[in-house]
Image (tube, coloured by chain):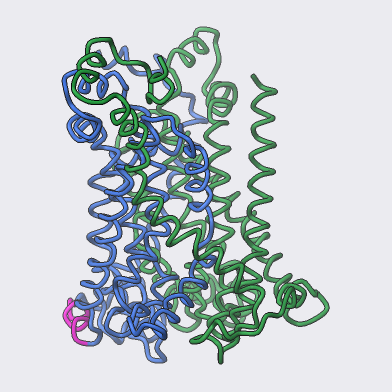
Chain colours: A blue, B green
Amino acid sequence: MADTIRRSPTAPPNSFMWTRRVILTLLALFTAVPLYVMISSSLKPLHDVTGSFQWIPSEITFSAYVDIWDTVPLARYFLNSLIVAGAATACSVVIATFAAYAVSRYRFRGRRVFTVTILSTQMLPGILFLLPLFLIFVNIGNTTGIALYGSRGALILTYLTFTLPFSIWMLIGYFDSIPRDLDEAAMVDGCGALGALFRVVVPAAVPGIIAVTIYSFMTAWGEVLFASVMTNEQTRTLAIGLNGYATQTQVYWNQVMAASLVASLPIVAGFLLLQRYLVAGLTAGAVK
Amino acid sequence: MTTVTTRPTAPPPGPPVKSRRRRGPRLSARVRRAGLPYLLLLPAVLLELLIHIGPMAVGIWMSFRDLTQQYIRTWDTAPWVGLDNFSVAVDVDAPVGEALLQSFFVTCAFTVLAVGLAWLLGVTAAILMQENFGGRGALRGFFLTPYALPVYAAVITWSFMLQRDNGMVNHVVHEQLGLTETPPFWLIGDNSFVSLVVVAVWRTWPFAFLIIMAALQNIPRELYEAAQVDGAGIWQQIRKITLPSLRPVNQVLVLVLFLWTFNDFNVPYLLFGKAAPESADLISIHIYQSSFVTWDFGAGAAMSVLLLLFLMVVTAVYLLVTSRERKHDG
C-alpha cells in the first residue's frame, strides 16, 4: 500500500539528492548554532563566558540554573507572563469564537465592515496603538485615580490588540471549512443557534481553536513593545525582565542564557507537541 | 416569504418553521434571529472600539497637538498646533525630517533583504522536504524551533553571540579564521544592519517554511503522476507544477512577511536597546524613540499617522496588483 502512495516510482536523480543534502545541512547548521550557544553557555561556569568564546565548556555546571532564581526575580517575571499571556489568550479565544460564528454563519448588515476592520487592524504595527493607549491610561489615572498604567489588567487589554483580531480571523476561516449541514442538522433537531455552536461547531473546530490558542499565547508570551512601556517592577514580564538583565553593564551571560532557556522551554515544548494543529489551523484559516 | 431575507443561510426545511410559528408571535422570533449575530459580535465590537478604533482616533487627535512632556498627564491642555507636527516630520532639510527619511530608507532596505531571504529559504527547504525521507519529521520540528522560541530569548542569544569581546561570531571571524585585523563591532556602527538582517531572517524563515509546507500538501498528487508519465524529471516538476501551484499562497505570505518585517520592533529593540544605531534604525523603533525617549508625543503621533497612510497605500496597491494578475491568469 505504501508503495502505491509514494509519489515517484523512480528515485530522484543524484543532482537533486545532493542539492537537498547540502542545502538542508547548511540550514540545519544555521538553525543549530545559536541554539547550541544558548544551551552550552547556560551550562558553563562564569569564567568561561567572560573571556574569549569557547565552543566546549571547560566544565559542565548547573549553577547558572540555580543562581538565576536569586539574581533576578525570575519566578515573579514568570508568573506575570503566565497571567498576562493566559488571560489575553483566554479572553480573545472566547470572544473570537462568538464573533467568528456570527460572521461565518450569518449574513447581516455591517458584516463586511467588521471583517475588513479586523483584517486591517491585525496588520497594523503595535506602535500605532501603544502611543495613544499609554496616554489614555496615564490620563485616566490622573483624573480618576485608577492606576491603569503599570497594572496587569491594562497590559492584558493592550495584548488583545494583537491576539483578538488574529483569533477572529483564523476562526472565521476555520468555521467556514466546517460544513453548514452539520449545524443546520443540529438546529433541525431542536438546538438553538447557540446549541449548534457549542454542540457541533466548537467540537468540530477543536484543531482550529487549539491553533489559535497556541499562537495567541506564543505571541503574548514573547511580546516586548507594550510590556516595555506598560509594566513596572512589580508587573514586569519575562521579556522585559530578561532584557533588562542582559543589558546591565556586567552581564552574567551563563545565567542570562539559562534564564532564556527556562523561559523558552514551556513554549517550545508546547509548540512542537501541538504543531500539527497549528499547521491544520493555518491551512484552513490564513492560507485559504 | 419575507423571513427568507433575514434568515442567515439556506432556508431550513418546512416543519421547524411551522412549529416556531405556533410557539410565539412571529415578529419577536424574527427580531431575535436578526439580532443574534449582533449579539454574538457585541463583545468583539466593543473591544475593537476600545482598543483599536478609539486609540487610533486619539492618535490622530494627538498628532495635531503639541504633546510634550509637561502635558502628558493633562493632555487636554496641550496646545493645538495644526499640521506643525507633520510639517516638521516631512521637512527633510531639518534634523527631525532627515532622521525620519533615513529611518524610512533603512527600513525599506531591511524589509526587502529580510523578506526576500526568509521567503527564499522557506520555499527552498519546503520543496526539498516535500517528499518523505528518513528523519524528515524531526528535521521539520527542528527547523521550526527558532520560530517557536520567544523572540527575546532568541534575540538575547544572538546579542551574546555578537558581543565584540566574548561573542561567538568574533571568535570565529577574528580568532579562528583571522579574517579581520581587529575584532569588529556588530551591535554599533554600519555592521549593525547586517546583524539585524541575519537575526530577522533566522527568526522568520521558519514561518515561511511552515506555510509553504502546509500549502504543498494541497497540491494534488495526480498532477505529479501525470507529469511523470509524460517524462518530466524532478526539476521540471518543481518548475512546472510546484512553483505555479504556490502562487496564491506566496501572494499572501509575502504580504504578511512584509508587514511583520517592515513594522518589526522586537529585534532592533532587543539587539540595540532604546536608541538603535543609525544604520539599523527601523521605523517602529524610531517612532518609539521619538515618543518615549524624547517625550514628544505629538511628533510621535504624527509619524504614526504617516506610517499608517504608507502601509495602507502599499497594501492596497499590492492587493490590487495581485488580484489583477490572478484575473489575467484565470
Q: Is residue A218 magenta?
A: no
* Quarter residue A139 falls in: bottom left
Q: Position of residue A158 (x, y in %)?
A: 39, 66
Q: Position of residue B43 (x, y in %)?
A: 34, 51
Q: Position of residue A171 (x, y in %)?
A: 35, 40
Q: Residue furthest front?
A: B25
Q: Is residue A66 magenta?
A: yes
Q: Residue at x 64, y 27 (%)?
A: B326
Q: Position of residue B229 (x, y in %)?
A: 50, 7
Tell me where the magenta segment starts and ends, as one range. Answer: A62-70
Q: Residue furthest top?
A: B229
Residue closer to the observer: B245 or B19: B19
Q: Residue at x 44, y 12 (%)?
A: B222
Residue closer to the observer: B221 or B330: B330
Q: Residue at x 27, y 42 (%)?
A: A209
Is A214 drawn above or below residue B308 in the view shown? above
Q: Residue at x 44, y 47 (%)?
A: B207
Is B151 drawn above or below residue B187 in the view shown? above
